[in-house]
Structures are given as C-alpha cells and as structure tokens.
Amino acid sequence: MMYGIGMGFGMVLWWALIIGGITFAVYSLGSSKKGSSKNNKPIDILKERFAKGEISEEEYEQRKQILM
C-alpha cells in the first residue's frame, strides 16, 4: 500500500518539475524581450526624446548630425 502512495508522489513531483521548467523557460524568454528595449540605438533614443517633446527640433537635428 505504501508503494502506491510513493509512486503517486513521484508522479506529482515529476509533473511539477516539468511544469516548473516550462514556466521558467517562458518567463525567461519574455523577460529577455523586455530587456532588449534597454539596448536602444542612440538614434532611437533621440527620436523618442524628440517625440516626447523633451528636446527641440533644432537640438534634435544637431544631435542627429553628430550621431550620423
């Protein structure tokens, strides 16, 4: 009788490890995509700042010329 309970626990543990591994893989892939936005090219950052109104058009053009 104890053998049956042990086998059931082993199966539950095995499935928990599989599901945990899949969850970890999905989470890792999702977080790596989010992290890639931190590695924007300088010109992209400049465009974002201009779009947000943080810098003027003159300043945008000057900095764009420097980066190009």
Image (cartoon, rainbow, N blue to C red):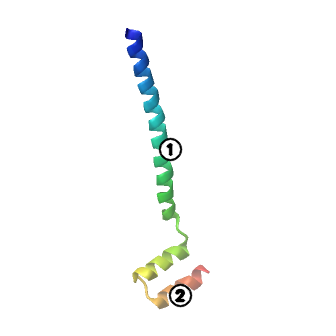
Left or right? Give the position of 67 relative to 19. right
Quick one: label 1 or label 2, which is nearer the N terminus?
A: 1
Specify the quadrant that holds the C terminus. bottom right
Q: Residue at x 50, y 57 (%)?
A: 33
The residue lying furthest to the top in this view is: 1
Q: Residue at x 49, y 40 (%)?
A: 22
Please give the residue where the numbered disc 1 appears in the rendered image: 25
**Gap between marks 1 and 2, in whole Å?**
44 Å
Please give the residue where the numbered disc 2 appears in the rendered image: 62
Q: Is residue 4 above or below residue 24?
A: above
Q: Is residue 47 above or below residue 14?
A: below
Residue 10 screen position, x and y as percent: 44, 21
Three-letter amino acid code at disc 2? Gln
Count residues near mark 2 (Cα–Cα under 10 Å), then give few for <14, some for 14-19, many for 20+.
Answer: few
Three-letter amino acid code at disc 1? Ala
Mark 2: secondary structure: helix
Q: Quadrant of residue 5?
A: top left
